[in-house]
Amino acid sequence: MTALSRRASAVLAGIALLVSACSAPSGSPSPLASPTASPSAAGESASPIDVPSATPTPTSEVSAEPSAQAITTYTVVAGDTLYSIAGRFATTVAQLQAWNAQRYPSIVTSPGAIAVGWELIVVGAADVTPLPTPTAVPTPTVTVAPPSGAACHAGDRVAASPAGVYKRIPNAGKEMALTFDMGGRLDPALDILNFLITNRVCATIFPTGAMSQTTTGQQVLAVIRAHPDLFEVGNHTMHHCDLVHGGGGSPTAAPCKTGGRPSTAFVEQELTDAGAIIAAASGQSPVPYWRPPYGTYDQTLLDVAAGVGYTKTILWSIDTIDWMPISDGGPTAQQIASKVVANAVSGSIVLDHLGGYETLAALKIMVPQLRQRGFTLTSISDLFDG
């Protein structure tokens, strides 16, 4: 074959290959195609920034009617509260109310009265409620069950007579009471109540009227209202004033500046105003239980309190001093727990605060230890019952 013939054959072979490539099926991948880049309308390769994201763009507002694709439901079981459910799903009570108000109107008017079997909406919306994976939702763990054959109860109030001052309750058997004042800081209050509910610990709560009117205070009393088998209330006065010397007060001292010992009328109003607020929100009358602010009392004060029905003055035998932060010299959780466990006897009354800095962590230590010692952790009413 001549050189010219060989050159012509090569050209013809190249043309054949080109025609073959152009007629390949459109779905066939090209060996040069990038798996991530695709031509733009202008013929340029798109940068990674231009690749559409599979993650939806967050919205700035939360809808009370989430899209069907975002909805997850949770079925209420015994012991649940809106606050515990909100905690499990990293959302807020207000958001749960917004999502579920149309189906369950009472979730707004009576947030403490959710019912077993309700299917509540929990939404995985950006910047609002991270949708938990099955492994991210913790299952509540009961630390140590109550002693065999022993169960606490609350609300079975004793008769107003005879009057008395109690630092501990004699003849209570192997029972003791964890009591909680609600007169100031309330940051961990709902978490504390949820812990008590999960672990079936009965308790007596002493709110002030002023703190009962706050948003968190109302939520606390709603939880109490929903669990009358576990929680009962006493009266801690309206403004937490020193009712013997004057002064004091929380969250403001203004109402307590009486210029000396408060008058009989002032003391009566401190108790009756608080009692009405507490009863309306919790569904329980605090009578006849009350706790004088700062533990300050004398016979004159006791007589005035008894005159408006508060004949059982409940003090304490173990003071946790949990209202003081560690930075100011307050106790650690371990110190609180050790103090309570070491000093617990039949009929002990422990003074805690719903706003205590280390209280929740201390409870997680002391509750199982006290139960291992055979104590039933119960209410003041249960101690009186013996």
Image: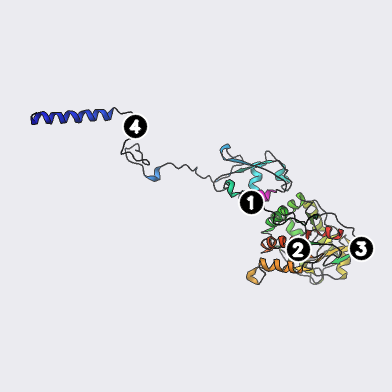
Residue 180 quadrant = bottom right
Q: Is residue 84 visible?
A: yes
Q: Classify 10 Å Cα crowding around label 3: few (below 14), some (14-19), many (20 and above).
A: few
SS under mark 1: helix
Residue at image coords 71%, 57%: 144
Q: Which residue is mark 3?
A: 162
Tag 2 near tag 1, CB within 8 Å: no
Amino acid residing under circle 1: Gly
Left or right: where 21 falls relative to 267? left
Mark 2 to mark 3 CA distance (whole Å): 32 Å
Q: Is residue 78 magenta?
A: yes
Amino acid residing under circle 2: Arg
The disc, 4 or 3, on the residue closer to the chain's N-terminal end is 4
Q: Which residue is mark 2?
A: 373
Amino acid residing under circle 3: Pro
The disc, 3 or 1, on the residue closer to the chain's N-terminal end is 1
Q: Which residue is mark 1?
A: 87
Tag 1 near tag 4, CB within 8 Å: no
Left or right: where 35 falls relative to 144? left
Q: Which residue is mark 4?
A: 28
Mark 4 to mark 3 CA distance (whole Å): 95 Å
Residue 278 quadrant = bottom right
In x, y percent, where is residue 270? 81, 62
Task: Give the foreground label among 2 and 1.
Answer: 2
Task: Give the foreground label among 2 and 4.
Answer: 2
